[in-house]
Image (cartoon, rainbow, N blue to C red):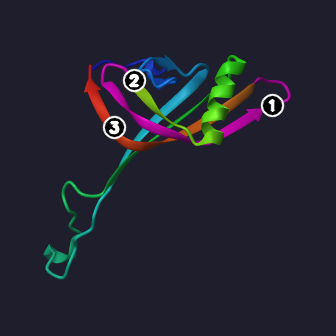
Amino acid sequence: MAAQKGRELLLKVDGTGAGAFSTVAGLRTRSLSLNARPVDITNADSANGWRETLAGAGVKSAAVSGSGVFLDAAADETARGYFFNGTIREWQIILPDFGTIEGLFQITGLEFNGDHDGEVSYSLSLESAGELTFTAV
C-alpha cells in the first residue's frame, strides 16, 4: 500500500438521519482511535503469573477527533447543537485505501480557539455510542 494523503481521511455525518452523509467542513486534522478493554481472568493457576484475558469479551470503543476552521455559520450551529443537545448521529470515518468505519457517535468535546492575528479555530471530540461497522475498500 502506498502512502495516502492526510486530507483524504474524512469525517462525515448524516445530519438528517436520512442516510445522506456530508463531510465536516473546515477540518485540517483528523484522527481515529480504536480501543478494546480486555476482561482480566488471571487467577492463581495462570502460567507463571502472566495475565490472561477472555477472548471476545470486554468493551470496544472508538474515539475521533478533529480540528480546523468553521467555514460558515451553518457548520458552527450544527456542531454546537449536537454538543449542547447531546445528539447521537450516524458518522463515517473514511480511511483512504483502507475502508470506511461507520456508526453512532456523540460529540463529547467542543473547543474554540483564536489568536489576535489569526482565524478562529475549533476542535471536536467524538465517542462511539453503539456498534461500528467496517467496510473495506
Label 1: state its secondary structure: loop
Mark toward the start of the polypeptide (2 vs 3): 2
Mark toward the start of the polypeptide (3 vs 1): 1
Mark toward the start of the polypeptide (1 vs 2): 2
Which image quarter: residue 137? top left
Q: Looking at numbered disc 1 in the image, what kind of residue is underneath it?
A: Asp
Q: Which residue is tagged 3?
A: 132
Q: Residues within 10 Å of mark 1 (few under 14, many from 20)?
A: few
Regarding residue 69, the answer to whether it shows in the image is no
Q: Residue at x 68, y 17 (%)?
A: 71
Q: Residue at x 18, y 57 (%)?
A: 55
Asked whether 65 or 87 is in front, the reply is: 87
Left of 108 or right of it: where is 111? right
Which image quarter: residue 39? bottom left
The image position of residue 128, as x and y in percent, is: 43, 42
Q: Which residue is tagged 2?
A: 94
Q: Nearer the observer, disc 2 or disc 3? A: 3
The image position of residue 1, as x and y in percent, is: 27, 20
Label 3: state its secondary structure: strand
Q: Which residue is tagged 1?
A: 115
Q: Which residue is situated farthest in the bottom direction here?
A: 44
Q: Looking at numbered disc 3 in the image, what kind of residue is underneath it?
A: Leu
Q: Residue at x 27, y 68 (%)?
A: 40
Q: Looking at numbered disc 2 in the image, what kind of residue is underneath it?
A: Ile
Regarding residue 103, the answer to whether it shows in the image is yes
The image position of residue 98, as x and y in percent, is: 30, 24
Label 2: state its secondary structure: strand
Residue 69 is one of the magenta-drawn residues: no
How many angstroms separate mark 3 from mark 1 (CA)? Answer: 37 Å
